[in-house]
Amino acid sequence: MKSARVLLAENLARLMAQSTNLRSARQLALRARVAQTTISNWLRIDRAPTLAPQLSALEAVAKAFGISVGELLSEPVNDELVVRLRSELQASRAHASRVSRMLYELAALLESGDAAVEPAARDFNDPSSTELQDYLLSGAPPSLASRRTSADRKK
């Protein structure tokens, strides 16, 4: 059985390699709001083998990855399944982005009546897409969305 320090280092390295936006100690430290040297020390068990991580830092790093501290300090369960699910999630997000672009293109065509219009497509993760008409696409209750009739769209 591996020690918690070894598991922490291995899990951090694996999670950082699988992540799209937390691939370096610097990126992870910024997201988790811990010192970059803390992350680096956790990754290098040979440099400081007796270093004991603080629980608050472990919680912050686990939260940055969207996992629990227990998952961060335990052996990975069926790593192949996690990799497959992550790739399916990435494909699903790409599909959602394509569908979003098609919906914006369709809306632009319906509003203008001109097929030569270049719509402004936005990514699903775009924080600036918070206009009322976007809430239906993001799953907000219909009562919060703007009420537009088909006659309004044709104008």
Image (cartoon, helix red, strand yellow):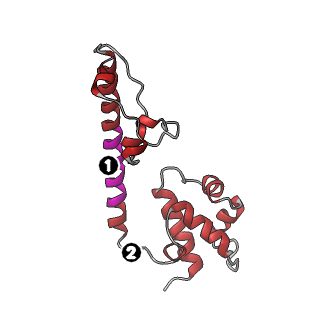
Pick whichever, 93 or 72, lies toward us: 93
The residue labelled by disc 2 is 77
> Disc 2 or 1, which lies upstream in sequence?
2
Residue 51: percent from left, percent from top:
70, 77
Can the viewer see residue 70 in this picture? yes
Amino acid found under the numbered disc labelled 1:
Ser
Relative to residue 94, is residue 148 depicted above or below?
above
Residue marked by disc 1: 92
Q: Which residues are magenta?
A: 85-97
Which element carries disc 1, helix, strand or loop? helix
- Residue 127 placement (x, y as % from top left): 52, 41
Name the residue at 30% across, 37% down.
99
Among the 4 quarters of the image, the one containing residue 57:
bottom right
Q: Amino acid at mark 2?
A: Val
Q: Residue furthest bottom?
A: 1
Q: Which mark is residue 112?
A: none
Percent of width and height locating residue 139: 38, 48
Mark yes or no: residue 43 visible: no
Locate residue 85: give its quadrant.
Answer: bottom left
Q: Position of residue 150 (x, y in %)?
A: 28, 26
Q: Residue at x 43, y 43 (%)?
A: 144
Is residue 122 located in the magenta-colored stretch of the structure? no
Crowd class of label 2 (few under 14; some 14 to 19; many from 20; radius 10 Å) = few
Of the residues tagged 2 and 1, which is closer to the observer? 1
